[in-house]
Amino acid sequence: MKEDLKIGIIGVGNIGSAHAAAISRGDVKGMTLSALCDNNPKRREEIRALYPDIPVFEDADALLASGLAEAVIVATPHYFHPPIAQKAFAAGLHVLTEKPAGVYCLAVREMMRSAKESGKAFGVMFNQRTNTLFRKAREIVSSGELGELKRVVWIITNWYRKQSYYDSGSWRATWSGEGGGVLINQAPHNLDILQWICGMPCAIYAKCDGGKYHQIEVDDDVSLFARYENGATAVFLTSTGEYPGTNRLEIAGTKGKLVVENGKLTHTKLAMDEREYRYSEESVQNKLTITEYAEEKRNGHIAILENFAAHILRGEALIASGYEAIHELTISNAAYLSAWLGKEIVLPMDDALFETMLRERADAEKSHIRTETRERVQFAYKSRWDTQWT
């Protein structure tokens, strides 16, 4: 059997440093930490002190050309994910990118083309796909057990952030540095799970409020409405300014309903399809079967890392393929475009128009009154990166 996959990490900020710590400790089966890269001198000092035996590079090109890594994790600010990944593919390396895969769809489609041409593995850090409740919900919907999709409501407002979070880096909460707010930073996990379970909608309408609860210009409160080809609808509400928040996913189908909340999945199943029941003389009483599933706790980041290594070493199917990352990004891009234009966006959308309008906002961005108080690098996974129910 092949030895562990030699992995380099490009961008050793909060999440990159957490990956480095987990891999170096031996917590990730099938991976060995072989190289690190960060363009911040202070961070390079910190990681050199912590990993004296691991080569540390100042720029991605040097790491990619070093021959020390077979694969890289790209954990830089969002805009840099596609160009660095493309360079890595060109250098013959496998790539696991942090979410989101990029800021706008055109760049991510170019990254997808590079990945396909290289023939190398391409993954994305959608760690919430490992959550056992979301996986069970997907299984139930995909099997047809829930019937035809009717309605989806996801209230995911427990992504609360203080002002100090946004002040921790000058790139945060800017159109030019981050590419947006809650939709591009926190909600990609949930938008991915939404489409992973229910499929892609055909149209998006959204209201994205910028700086509603914080001293930022990008969105910290979003109300999104989606339509599906079969007539089903979805409402997606998210915010970083609501406390205490809620995490409740409800999926209604013609054969029952799923509710995911507080670490539990409740499946209410009808004895017959509602589309048939509506014409019957039977009573609904005593015709419902209720099954509950409890969450099985696991570290989703480590699960994705181990799966990525197993995919390369043993051909195991990817939990989160990088090619699938375009779906959630399409939803968030469409939501922004809808808010900017004040109208519903039918998918597929005009990707070029979105990129143009995004760049206009980035170019016109005001000077921020907040002062950067850069966080010390965290060398462990934070609980806020897990699935939070309250």
Image (spheres, rainbow, N blue to C red):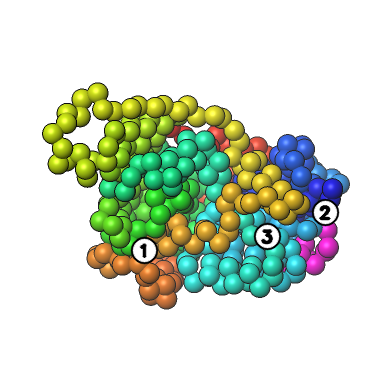
| Amino acid type of the residue that numbered disc 3 sits on in the rendered structure | Ala
In this view, the residue in front, 38 or 186, is: 186
Q: Is residue 42 visible to the viewer in this orientation of the structure? A: no
**Residue at horizontal 53 percent and vertical 70 percent from the top:** 109
- Residue 376 position in % (x across, y down): 63, 42
**Residue at horizontal 41 percent and vertical 69 percent from the top:** 358
- At label 2, counting other C-alpha atoms closer than 10 Å, the crowd grade (few under 14, some 14-19, many 20 or more) is some
**Residue at horizontal 58 percent and vertical 68 percent from the top:** 112
Assign a secondary structure to mark 3. Answer: loop
**Residue 62 left/right relative to 154:** right
- At label 1, counting other C-alpha atoms closer than 10 Å, the crowd grade (few under 14, some 14-19, many 20 or more) is many
Q: Is residue 273 visible to the viewer in this orientation of the structure? A: yes
Alpha carbon distance from label 3 to label 1: 28 Å
**Count of numbered circles in the view:** 3
The mark nearer the N terminus, 1 or 2, is 2
**Residue 167 left/right relative to 20:** left
Residue 55 numbered tag: 2
Asked if marks 1 and 2 touch (Cβ < 8 Å), the reply is no
Assign a secondary structure to mark 2. Answer: loop
Is 190 situated above or below 342? above
Residue picked out by circle 1: 334
- Which residues are the magenta region? 60-68
Give the number of the mark in front: 3 or 1: 3
- Residue 25 position in % (x across, y down): 77, 37
Residue picked out by circle 3: 121
Is 66 within the magenta? yes
The mark nearer the N terminus, 2 or 3, is 2
Alpha carbon distance from label 2 to label 3: 24 Å
- Residue 87 position in % (x across, y down): 68, 69
Q: Residue furthest top?
A: 286
Asked if marks 3 and 1 touch (Cβ < 8 Å), the reply is no
